[in-house]
Image (tube, rainbow, N blue to C red):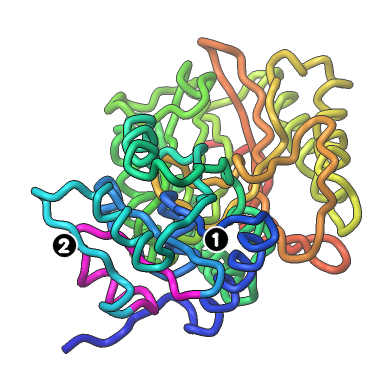
Amino acid sequence: MYIKRMSFAEEEFKSRLAKVQEEIKARGLDMMLVHTPENIFYLTGHHSAGYYMYTCLVVHPTKEPVLVVRYGEVGNALIYSFLNKDNLCIYDDTDDPLEKTVEGIKQLEANPKKIGTEETSFFFSIRNYKALAGKLTAAELISAGGLVEQFRIVKSPAELDYIRKACRAVNAGMKAGMDAIKEGENEDNVAAAIWQAVVSHGCQHMGMEPFVAKGWKSGLMHNVWSGDAIVNGDCILLEIPAAINRYHGALMRSAYVGNPPEIIKEWSDVCIEALNAALKAIKPGVTSGDVDEACRGVIERAGLYDHFRKRTGYSIGCAFAPDWGEGHICSLQKGDKRLLVPGMVYHMPPAIRMLGEFGVGFSETVIVTENGCEICTDYPRELVIK
């Protein structure tokens, strides 16, 4: 016997699935093959660390979906998703999972003519695409990447609750990390303090590890601890995620050990001013590009754009490794015309870096509300001097 332990009520999953099914019909597709782990989780609740093995959700416009899944993952599918065993097409490690995918397709539609595929998915390889095309010669595989993702942009109240909880874990991680920073401390111990804090606040399944970058490494994007001792004069950049039921929040702050030089203080002030401008700009009806312009404009006027050169922020929500964000779905970036609406969630991390020397950055995770934004993260928005 087993007990269902779903992240959301079955009604919420069914509502999401119904929207996707309507879109499948609207595009004239007979069905859709979903290979992206986040999308499978979003539509069914199924999740496992074993998503590195082939998994495919076959979505029909009027019938219940079929999940093509490895035998070892059946328990996870039955417990974490609303699906039952009749919805599963199971393969052993010695089976060809693509043959099972064809079997799942035929289970729902004997002779489909147009099948949507996620050509943009990390988890639908060229080899598997070609193999499926070779097995489905009577059908046309239609590019439908982004079909599911469009419905993930605006979060439900239950999704927002998970994100708020993730941000509380992030806040604890940032406090623990900053408290651990001191001259002579091993960089690894700062990372360990962060991990202990976020996990003790319920964090599991991060899409990417925290970034703990000191000294010259703070001038590099996406850098981690290396076991060095912290010394006087180190600039330290912390960017910390946490996830509750796969839903993420993130937070970036900077610290300096010793008496910071003017350039560190000035660049920190510019970053904070840029972030504040972005926060002020967020409200329903403005475009993603408007928010980016508010942030980027501050940095450009300070003459530091060449040390920035990136987007202002990105959507954040449910994520599986290798990323904690949803920037591939939507971002706050130059010229973007997407209109903000309540329920969107963004992580905004303006950072300014001097390659090979230092970098500073400050961020918040925010929810777009009816009147502006709700800041979910909570740590003093200032350069921490240790």
Q: Quadrant of residue 185?
A: top left
Q: Is residue 243 visible?
A: no
Q: Nearer the viewer, residue 175 or 247?
A: 247
Q: Which residue is mark 2?
A: 71
Mark 2 crowdedness (10 Å alpha carbons): few <14, some 14-19, many ≥20: few
Residue 372 in percent (x, y) is at 85, 61
Q: Which residue extends farthest top? A: 356
The picture quadrant where one finds residue 124 is top left
Which label number is shown at residue 42? none
Instruction: Say above or below: 31 vs 98.
Output: below
Label 1 close to label 2 by CB (< 8 Å): no
Does label 1 or label 2 sit earlier along the sequence? Answer: 2
Q: Position of residue 94 (x, y in %)?
A: 8, 48
Q: Amino acid at mark 1?
A: Cys
Circle 1 sits in a helix, a strand or a loop, which is it? Answer: helix
In the picture, the quarter occupied by the N terminus is: bottom left
**At x 70% / y 31%, what residue is drawn?**
311
Query: Which residue appears at 45% of the width and 20% of the height?
Result: 217
31 vs 52, left or right, is right
Residue 10, relative to residue 275: is it above or below? below
The amino acid on which the numbered mark 2 sits, given as a three-letter code, is: Tyr
Identify the residue under disc 1: 167
- Residue 69 located left or right of residue 293: left
Q: Secondary structure at mark 2?
A: helix
Asked whether 277 or 146 is in front, the reply is 146
119 vs 292, nearest the viewer: 119
Q: Is residue 286 above or below residue 295?
A: below
Q: Which residues are magenta?
A: 63-83
Left or right, 384 with respect to 5, comes to: right
